[in-house]
Image (cartoon, rainbow, N blue to C red):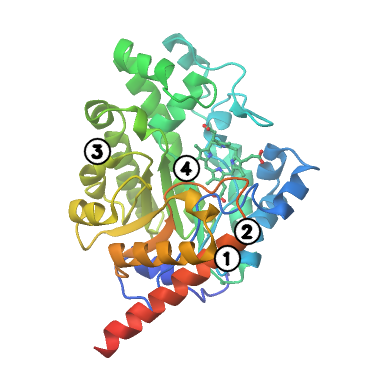
């Protein structure tokens, strides 16, 4: 499938917001918008395993389109997972029902790094993601932009050592204290793969990129500045340089460090167009730290979707007033949960549009 005849983009609100340009209404998308809260996703999952969906470009495209067909969202995000990178490096990752991702053979000691296929050919190993992106760009017919993504190095390293989800990340953190040099070696391997992966996603048709540092909350400022931030910065710089070399236009990049309230200032100076804000951060504080000209994304508590519609409307309005409609992309402060009502997602999306449009019109008439 060709990458040089994509249909023209009809809704570029999120791209304009990311670049700090004016918008008629605030764009909104929802982290984990394609997933288990949708009955059509649960239906397809009765027939296919999670990674069968991810690895089949047509099915990954179909799942990506599910929330787009239902709601007036302003972006699609390619259906995949951050753990495809450890898979490309040769690790086995299984998705266990009610447990989530699991690595039967995690990294235990630094010598295990040598088992990784560190010179893996990303173009080949993850070709199914790039095919899914190209197919989805055509299927979207320019309705909304398509977001590509990757996990950040520290978050991927912690999964590879913990072997799955963990509340403390203590095994992975032990590496940072016991084996700092080898930790840097692993983080560098991941960074190189992530850079190639993001560049290829843009070449395949991704129109924005989000980097997920989901495990920022387990680090302190010193560890984050030493083991996470330098790699986050190298990624944004090298992705831009490599795209330039390939004569491909760069796309806006979003950094989302969950629970990274203690490094917001550093993140806002890391050459990403957008900083994602989790729900624990006061919007006014995020604005003060990151500055008025930085585009912020977030940060409604995902559990607000359990509220009744009237309260949800009030919370959407409050969020818009606090962030302001300029330099802003509405989203949850983390991913949506499986037991949430799709009707409330629709309500939130529509209310963000309605309220922000009124705010903008009112300001223009003054
Ligand atoms: O059983 C199932 O059907 C699997 C559920 C599921 C889904 C739908 C997982 C397992 N991943 C996904 C898709 C996914 N993962 C997307 C799709 C696009 C969309 O947003 O709609 C994205 C962007 C991700 C990214 C992802 N995977 C992150 C970063 C975002 C975040 O939540 O911080 C993380 C940490 C993962 C790992 C992962 N994959 C799946 C689960 C349950 C988890 C989290 C496990 C844990 O550590 O608690």
> Is 90 left, or right, of 329 in this rendering?
right
Residue behind label 1 places its C-beta within 8 angstroms of ligand 1: no
Q: Tell us which disc is closer to us: 3 or 4.
A: 3
The one nearer the camera, 263 or 313, is: 313
Picture coordinates of residue 350, whole percent (x, y): 52, 71
Q: Secondary structure at mark 1?
A: helix
Q: CA distance from mark 3 to mark 4?
A: 22 Å
- Where is mark 2, residue-wise? 342
Q: Is residue 296 visible?
A: yes
- Where is mark 1, residue-wise? 346
Q: CA distance from mark 1 to mark 4?
A: 26 Å
- Where is mark 4, residue-wise? 150
Depicted 141 relative to depicted 124: above or below:
below
Picture disc at residue 107: none
Picture coordinates of residue 338, whole percent (x, y): 62, 45
Depicted 131 relative to depicted 249: above or below:
above
Q: Tag 3: Cα neighbours inside 10 Å, few (<14), some, or many (≥20)?
A: some
Q: Is residue 118 visible?
A: no
């Amino acid at each position: 499938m060709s990458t040089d005849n994509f249909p023209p983009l009809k809704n570029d609100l999120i791209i304009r917001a990311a670049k700090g340009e004016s918008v008629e209404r605030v764009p909104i998308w929802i982290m984990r918008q394609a997933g288990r809260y949708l009955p059509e996703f649960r239906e397809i999952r009765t027939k296919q395993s999670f990674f069968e969906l991810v690895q089949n470009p047509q099915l990954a495209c179909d799942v990506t389109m599910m929330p787009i067909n239902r709601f007036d969202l302003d972006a699609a995000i390619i259906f995949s997972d951050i753990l495809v990178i450890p898979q490309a490096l040769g690790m086995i990752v299984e998705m266990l029902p009610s447990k989530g991702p699991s690595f039967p053979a995690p990294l235990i000691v630094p010598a295990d790094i040598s088992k990784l296929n560190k010179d893996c050919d990303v173009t080949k190993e993850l070709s199914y993601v790039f095919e899914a992106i190209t197919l989805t760009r055509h299927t979207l017919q320019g309705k909304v932009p398509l977001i590509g993504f990757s996990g950040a190095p520290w978050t991927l390293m912690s999964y590879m050592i913990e072997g799955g989800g963990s509340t403390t990340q203590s095994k992975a953190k032990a590496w940072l204290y016991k084996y700092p040099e080898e930790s840097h070696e692993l983080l560098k391997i991941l960074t190189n793969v992530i850079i190639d992966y993001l560049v290829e996603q843009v070449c395949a048709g991704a129109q924005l990129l989000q980097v997920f540092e989901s495990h920022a909350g387990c680090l302190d400022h010193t560890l984050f500045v030493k083991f996470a931030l330098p790699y986050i910065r190298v990624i944004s710089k090298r992705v831009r340089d490599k795209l330039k070399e390939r004569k491909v236009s760069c796309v806006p990049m979003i950094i989302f460090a969950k629970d990274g309230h203690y490094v917001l200032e550093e993140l806002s100076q890391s050459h990403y167009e957008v900083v994602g804000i989790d729900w624990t951060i006061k919007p006014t504080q995020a604005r003060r730290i990151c500055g008025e000209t930085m585009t912020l994304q977030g940060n409604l508590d995902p559990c607000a979707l359990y509220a009744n519609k009237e309260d949800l409307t009030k919370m959407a309005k409050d969020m818009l007033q606090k962030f302001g409609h300029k330099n802003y992309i509405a989203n949850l402060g983390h991913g949506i949960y499986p037991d949430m009502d799709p009707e409330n997602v629709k309500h939130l999306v529509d209310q963000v549009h309605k309220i922000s449009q009124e705010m903008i019109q009112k300001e223009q008439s003054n």
